[in-house]
Image: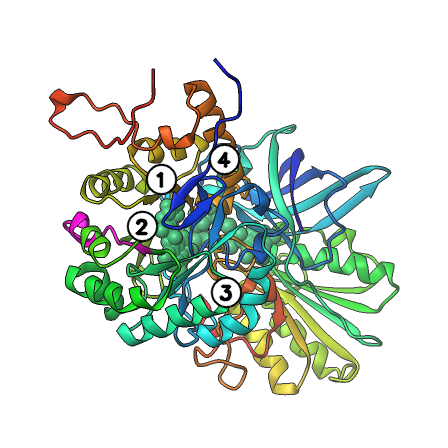
Amino acid sequence: MNLVGCSVVENREIAPGNFLLTLKVPRGFARPEPGQFVHLRVSPESEPLLRRPYSLEGFVERGKIRAVRIYYSVVGRGSRVLASQPKGQELDLIGPLGVGFTPRPRRTSVLVAGGRGVAPLLFFARKLREKKRPFLFLFGARSSRELYGVREIRGGRIHLATDDGSVGYHGSVLDLLKRQWESGEHTPLTAEIFTCGPHGLLHEVAEFAAGRGIRCEASLEGPMACAVGACRGCPVPLLPGAGGNGGRYPAMCIEGPVMDATIVDWERLP
Amino acid sequence: MTHASPSLRVRVGSLTLRNPVLVASGIIGYGQEYERLVDLSQIGGIVTKTVTRHARAGNPPPRVVETAAGMLNSIGIENPGLEGFLEIKVPVLRELPCAVIVSVEGEDVQEFCDLVEGVSGSGVAHAIEVNISCPNVGPHGLRYSTDADMAREVMSAIRPLTQLPLIAKLTPNVTRIADIAAACEACGADAVSLVNTFVGMAVDSRTRKPILGTVVGGLSGPAIKPLALAKVWEVVQAVDVPVIGMGGITHPRDAIEFLLVGSTAVQVGTALFSNPELAEACVKEIESYARRAEVPSVADLIGALDVPAERGMIRAGRTLAPR
Ligand SMILES: Cc1cc2nc3c(=O)[nH]c(=O)nc-3n(C[C@H](O)[C@H](O)[C@H](O)COP(=O)(O)OP(=O)(O)OC[C@H]3O[C@@H](n4cnc5c(N)ncnc54)[C@H](O)[C@@H]3O)c2cc1C
Ligand SMILES: Cc1cc2nc3c(=O)[nH]c(=O)nc-3n(C[C@H](O)[C@H](O)[C@H](O)COP(=O)(O)O)c2cc1C
């Protein structure tokens, strides 16, 4: 982890309100793992005050050039300011941060993406392909326009779901997951789940996994101040028995953002 | 005129800091967390996250939210407690290349005493900051921070227990902060530091819910700088011990403002999250400001605010910089 300068190579709106940002980083930026994030200063001005955390959608290395990619939604003032940054704009970031996805040997990875939560899972899928490991990619979004990155996924089977039925299964990605399991192809010993998306979806996926004894990791989101474990501003509530009941709050920034989904107390996670 | 480097050294009780820039409590953990981002060998020192008698898990989420030019926090002093601190954090703190000021907070006088004895005995602290000002820990926090008699009781009880400089950290959430500062001084505080956060609140009108898990929290960041400067100014008139100023330092020149108003040292807080190099930049700015002012020592800048007499205010200064 380091503080490094970076510059905008590309900042393009690829679906309404959703941008793909490519930032050139210096060699001092360590190779990130899928699931890790950066804490980005979205503007050279002192407004907004705090950095914004973003998962990496990808890491590109061509010769001596290194770049990170972020896929983000405009939801508030920080992301709005970020969307206005032109090519060539100098910014800085702290990273790579946090703990990424940790697949176990000899298992099929079942990736469950909801909306723009697909970002770190695209990075992960590329890595799995590189390592020639089997995976299944389940991706749900509101409509076909939000199915970012599908065409680039290689090396695994893909199943799509949309809320409006414009592409793939008409319904939730959770149903896709359930149907996969009902096919009998997977067992807790042969497969594990990796998920990212709205917390409501992650909660449902976690309950499904816990009910069947399937290992399940989820990438969490929430407000962060320091992002390096110092300020304790991003506590993750855990279920009783998992150190819950307020007994201990792991910091999302250093013990996450990817965590065992079955021990998170989703009811208490905003 | 000589071009020798101005001396940046300042004294807080028996402690000499190599320069007047510290990082505030709750910002940098125990130093280690920021080791790769802040060059601790360049700054005066750090104040640790507040240590309490018993371990605290902290408050439920959300604990932080950004507001206009600031942020609210309701961390609730998540920390490993005195025993955990001594076992896990002290070995880490020993390795730091800067002064270590340990912040402590008790629920009653006995806990303050246990903490001061424990921290003092560890040998790791260069000074102790007595946090009688946290807004995020329930009723006892408010009691000690807002009542001069209670402040007196705590300070008198802990004073005989340690040789280390004691710095009383004050809350701005009072009508007359100078009274609390004077009470602490009278009972043996070697310095006072201020301000802790201002009580604040954020509401989400869409969901009709308060944004923080604890409803109210503490406001920090650039939004509070003018408020903090005024509190420091008020306290500087009321006590003779050194005052350590903080609140909203975001640009290096903000640190100069706190010195001019009468702070002997400053603490960098919230803005470090965004700019980890801010504390080092403050040191550089203080040095270059002193050079430009052609003063031999940063001490000549402390309280050097030039207040026109006709404005009916007393000069804060002990020394006035030559202009
Ligand atoms: C580890 C981590 C990884 C993340 N990765 C990504 C990523 O890859 N892509 C991405 O777009 N975001 C990601 N986020 C979320 C991102 O950090 C926030 O969306 C961003 O900080 C919002 O900042 P803002 O100033 O635009 O909104 P704020 O002003 O902070 O919030 C404005 C409003 O938007 C709401 N809001 C805040 N965050 C979100 C959100 N995530 N979705 C919907 N509404 C929200 C707030 O509740 C508020 O009402 C990640 C967060 C974390 C912690
Ligand atoms: C996230 C956070 C945690 C804090 N924790 C503590 C603490 O444990 N003890 C304490 O005395 N002050 C604590 N503070 C207050 C700061 O030390 C400082 O007094 C205050 O933030 C004002 O300075 P600033 O505006 O530069 O941040 C905390 C502040 C923040 C933002």
User: Residue, x 66% and y 47% (percent of image)?
Assistant: A2
Three-letter amino acid code at disc 1? Thr
Residues under labels 4 and 1: Cα distance?
Answer: 13 Å
The residue that mark 2 highlights is B191
Dot 4 amino acid type = Val
Q: What residue is disc 4 on?
A: B283
Q: Earlier in the sequence, mark 1 or mark 3?
A: 3
Of circles 3 and 4, the one toward us is 3
Query: For residue B294, which quarter of the picture?
Result: top left
**In what element is the residue under mark 2?**
strand
User: Residue B190, how many percent across, how many down?
Assistant: 31, 52
In the picture as drawn, the residue positioned furthest to the right comes out as A132
Q: Mark 1 highlights which residue?
A: B264
Position of residue A253 measured from the top left corner of the image (x, y, whole percent): 57, 60
User: CB at mark 4 closer than 8 A to ligand 2?
Assistant: no
Secondary structure at badge 3 equals loop
Label 1 crowd (10 A; few <14 / some 14-19 / many >=20): many
Q: Which residue has dot 3 on it?
A: B123
Q: Mark 2 near ligand 2 (CB under 8 Å)?
A: no
**Which residues are drawn in magenta?**
B167-180
Q: Are marks 4 and 1 on the same chain?
A: yes
Q: Which circle, 4 or 1, is nearer the viewer?
A: 1
